[in-house]
Amino acid sequence: MSREENRKIESGVFDEYTKKTIYKLQNKGYFDTLDFPISTGKEADVYRGTTRDEEHVAVKIYRIETSNFKDMKKYLAFDPRFDEVRNNKRGIVKQWCKKEYKNLRDANEAGVRCPKPIKAINNVLVMEYIGREDGSPAPLLKDVEVEKPKKVIKKIEEYIDTLYDEAELIHSDLSEFNILIQDQEPVLIDMGQAVSTKHPQAEEFLERDRDNLEKISKQSKFK
């Protein structure tokens, strides 16, 4: 898809603030085109992007007008990496984008498999593309039958522990909707809501993640 075609798509979906951010990232070479949407939602859309060197990246674009700012502020609060939670929509989304970048960076450094962050500007996050050999996106855990289900569950359990012990983070929204399967291995995604272990609700969020994983493990395809 050409840049001109990209611009036509973007002009019908994104506001001027977002379009300027996308063009800035394109001009800096982080990606050349947006190929197709991987996922769409109320708070963010994720696209596969392609660089001038024909490498794929994932481009996550947070929606400013439709995001749940009350929830975002709950997860941003008490994070020592953010001195103050802003009250305007654009400011909150910008902080959230920055927060996901930092969460992905810290999780990767701790050894948790999740997309490697590349660049975050305003409400747009560029990160590693998790895909198949044919260039299509890796499937969600909910949509695939894994060959060794118990091994996958055990690996996710290890990631929960590593996040807590090494990165001092809790995913806080772990489910089969935000775990990808690439080469039969789990990859955690949607790390924006991950909180510091110092968050006052940290233990509650950790227990919720563990409960959700237990529910997944009880599904017939994981027996």
Image (tube, rainbow, N blue to C red):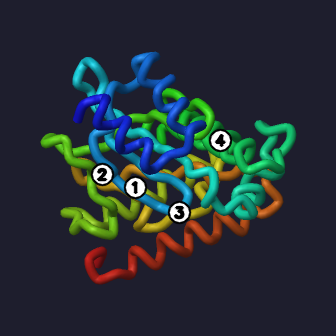
Which numbered disc flags the more N-terminal residue, 1 or 4? 4
Q: For numbered disc 4, what is the local secondary structure?
A: helix
Question: Disc 2 marks which residue?
Answer: 185
Secondary structure category for the residue under label 1 = helix
Closer to viewer: mark 3 or mark 2: 3
Q: How far apart are marks 3 and 4 (CA)?
A: 18 Å
Q: Which amino acid does label 2 sit on?
A: Glu
Q: Left or right: where does residue 34 sit relative to residue 189?
A: left
Q: Is 67 located above or below residue 164 in the figure?
A: below
Please, is residue 217 above or below residue 31 in the view? below
Q: Do the residues labelled 3 and 4 touch (CB within 8 Å)?
A: no
Q: Nearer the viewer, mark 1 or mark 4?
A: 4
Q: Residue at x 46, y 16 (%)?
A: 28
Q: Which of marks 2 and 1 is in front?
A: 2
Q: Marks 4 and 2, how far apart in space?
A: 25 Å
- Residue 147 found in image quarter: bottom left
Residue hosting label 1 = 155
Q: Is residue 4 above or below residue 76?
A: above
Query: Could you say where residue 97 lies in the image, as x and y percent from the top left?
Result: 61, 41
Label whose residue precedes the other's in the sequence (4 or 2): 4
Q: Distance between the residues labelled 1 and 4?
A: 24 Å
The residue positioned 65% from the left and 41% from the top of the image is 99
State the residue position of label 4.
99
Instruction: Report, in whole angstroms, how far the alpha carbon at label 3 lies from the one at label 2.
Output: 28 Å
Amino acid type assigned to the residue bearing label 1 in the image: Lys
